[in-house]
Amino acid sequence: MLIKRQGTPNDAETSLGKTAFHTAIRNGLPEVAKLLWSAGADVDLIDNEGMTPIQEAGWQILTRTNSQAHRDALQSMFDTTMWSEALELSLLHKAVVNLLPGVNLEEFIRVHKSLLNVQDATLRTPLHWAAETADENALDALLVHHADTSIRDCFGDTPLMKAVKKGSMNCIKKLLVARADPTVTNNLRETTLHLASRHSVEMIDLLRSMGVPFSPSIQNLTPLDWAAITNNVEVGRHLISLGVDVNFPDGRGHTTIFHATICWGQEFARMLLGLPQLDLSVLNHDGETVLHVLARHGDIRGACAFLDAEIHGLDPDVVSSKGETASEVFEVRLMPPVGFDAIFQRLVVKLRDNFHSRSIMEDIFFYTKEK
């Protein structure tokens, strides 16, 4: 595309304003990032959340989010001076993230107390970074000096939200003791429960005990949807047992089974398909069933999960608002997984048989009842 001038490395998608360069860095694709940079990708383009690609790289390196190989590749592209200056880290930020080796942090905070709540280019305070890197010693040192737990960064996240995202129970408990508010929401109206659903039942129960509600995000995503997206079956079962609705539609009309299917959460899909309350007749805003979504995004294991389940309420011949059945969606799919075709066709035949058998039985039931 770059050679044929069908796109530029600085083209941004509309929802989050991220370029391909942002995405390559975030998703652990250093070779793609290098290609885009050599083609003229701008390291300083700001996305809709206030982050540039080089700031994203610095965040990846400091939080150890991706593999060591990925972080090493980023470090070879952007040296420490480049990304630390792009993040506009203060001396206290640098001390907290160990860019000033040999520093006694508690003494350093006393000397530089005016920097205690200073925000960097992404609006993170030193406390945000301590929480996001799960550095309990740094967190303790900052909280002893009454670092502000309520400040929000460019995502609307508080330090507590960073600790929840990181999955650090110890940091979460320390921040709660320091009276961090667990009920606030970020820019996407996500609660701490949305963020905790990627981690553990213990975290869910702790936050529920603090009064955090099961409210949907700005995209109408529930914590259960996020558990499905991350294929966290244990948390999913627990949330369902607490009453979270498996058929609650998001902003696109997708229920939880749609998310499990799109994100290849095969184990989660199997769990959902065994629930009597699961409604597979739901249509999204394009008039598509979950079978359309499976045809477009699914993999072999996901198709097998549907094939193995006893499904009677999913009509494989539903025509979407675009005039397509699920089979027609599959026919135009580019490069489906090897072997997916055969399993998907078997699934369509089975669903058709089950759906029509059910329709016949319902007709017989109503006819008998009328008699």
Image (cartoon, helix red, strand yellow):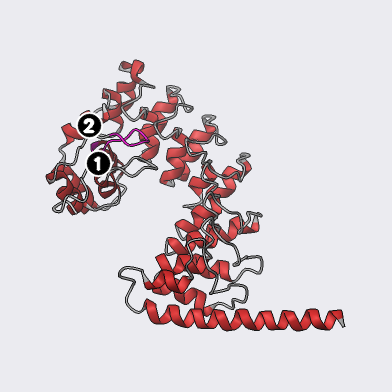
- Quick check: 211 left or right of 333? right
Magenta segment = 46-54
Q: Nearer the viewer, residue 285 or 354?
A: 285
Q: Nearer the viewer, residue 296 or 29?
A: 296
Crowd around label 2: few <14 · some 14–19 · many ≥20 (10 Å): many
Which residue sits at x=60%, y=40%?
A: 212
Q: Is residue 350 left or right of residue 95?
A: right
Residue flagged by tag 2: what amino acid is it?
Ser
Please tell me how crowded label 1 is: few (under 14), some (14-19), or many (20+) other residues with Cα within 10 Å. Answer: many
Residue placed under numbered mark 1 in the picture:
57
First reached walking from the N terminus: tag 2 or tag 1? 1
Q: What main secondary structure does the magenta stretch of the protein show? A: loop
Specify whether residue 102 is in view: no
**138 in magenta:** no
- SS of the residue at dot 2? helix
Left or right, 215 with respect to 68, comes to right
> Of 203 and 12, which appears nearest the observer?
12
The residue lying at 60 percent from left, 55 percent from top is 239
Kindly identify which numbered label has been placed on residue 84. Answer: 2
Residue 59: which quarter of the image? Answer: top left
Residue 254: x and y in percent read 53, 56
Outermost residue, front side: 323
